[in-house]
Amino acid sequence: MAHVISTVNMKGGVGKTTLTVNLATCLAKNYNKKVLVLDLDSQISATLSLMSPHDFAKIRKKRRTLSYLIDNIINYNPYSKLKTEDIICPSICEINRLELLPGDIELYDEYLVSEMLHKQTIGDEQNDFEKVWNKFERSLVQKIIAPIRDQYDYILIDCAPGYNLLTRSGIAASDYYLLPARPEPLSIVGIQLLERRVAKLKQNHQENEAINLNLLGIVFIESGGGLLGRYYRQVMRRVKEDFSPQQLFETSIPMDVNVAKAVDMFMPAVIAMPNSSGSKAFIKLTQEVLAKLA
């Protein structure tokens, strides 16, 4: 059964999606692992890092995105034709073992979710909205990946910044979470906030089925040189005081314009610019990830 890993940070713009798609690509391309990328962010950054907007528009027109699966959970339709495996796009970037469950710019209707949970609360003997909410939060992403989980070695979930319903559900469905961070004060605050939220999430679900979730590690993104590099190192020292060496990856991802150029080409840097410093760092980081999981 697949290792499920969420990539998450409360703050946006820390390299979360770049880390997810390049790690997934390295696992599939260099280690022959079967990998699924699940895009939970309505900005669809992971989706557009692996396919062109034109290709995405075609699958969205056919409703073959994550939104279809979520709609079917909120308003269950026993005659629904498409299942999780029907939505998945195979052989992404022409890599046989790299697959994508594409996101959508409109993932779910918050009003419909609230209405559904309200009805379930009325029908619940204890009439406990919090209990009903926690159950839905825990099961939403789990229901989506459960039918296909044993078909993969790794499922990498790209979560939205912040802490919305899908992010919480993605974390709850995961075995591990990755924390990408820039060595900047606001990014560090994002780490601290997320750690508190994860602890609270575990506590909320403790009464029913405990969440078996662990921090895989913190990955520093874009540690620049010169004066900025010295400042980054000062911030990184502060982080090292709060976390054990096992919780910090040795490999950091350097500033590399080629990584940004690859995004414009709608493919991971490790494919578009394989000899760049950023790509080499992602390859080295993948080795670390495999060593930690082993």
Image (spheres, rainbow, N blue to C red):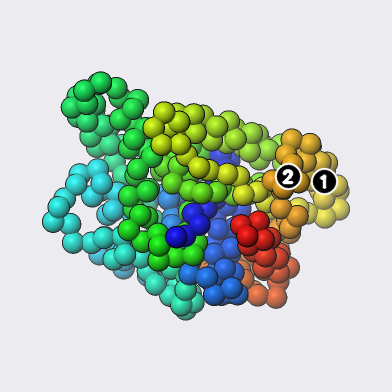
Task: Find residue 88 and report its image quarter.
Answer: bottom left
Q: How many marks?
A: 2
Q: Position of residue 212 (x, y in %)?
A: 50, 42
Q: Residues within 10 Å of mark 1 (few under 14, many from 20)?
A: some
Which residue is denoted by mark 1 in the rendering? 233
Q: Residues within 10 Å of mark 2 (few under 14, many from 20)?
A: many
Give 13 or 64, whichever is nearer the viewer: 64
Q: Residue at x 69, y 46 (%)?
A: 247
Q: Amino acid at mark 1?
A: Arg
Mark pair 2, 1: CA separation: 7 Å
Image quarter (top left, top right, bottom left or bottom right) of the N terminus: bottom left
Q: Which mark is residue 183?
A: 2
Confirm whether residue 289 shows in the render: no
Helix, strand or loop at label 1? It is: helix
Q: Residue furthest left?
A: 79
Q: Residue at x 55, y 58 (%)?
A: 20
User: Of label 2 and label 1, which has the lower sequence position?
Assistant: 2
Q: Residue at x 51, y 49 (%)?
A: 175
In the displayed structure image, the side of residue 240 where residue 85 appears, left or right: left
Q: Residue at x 49, y 29 (%)?
A: 203
Give 194 or 57, whichever is nearer the viewer: 194
Q: Position of residue 107 (x, y in %)?
A: 34, 48
Q: Amino acid at mark 2?
A: Pro
Give 73 or 67, whichever is nearer the viewer: 73
Give 263 or 36, whichever is nearer the viewer: 36
Q: Position of residue 227 (x, y in %)?
A: 86, 48
Confirm whether residue 181 shows in the render: yes
Discs 2, 1 touching: Cβ within 8 Å: yes
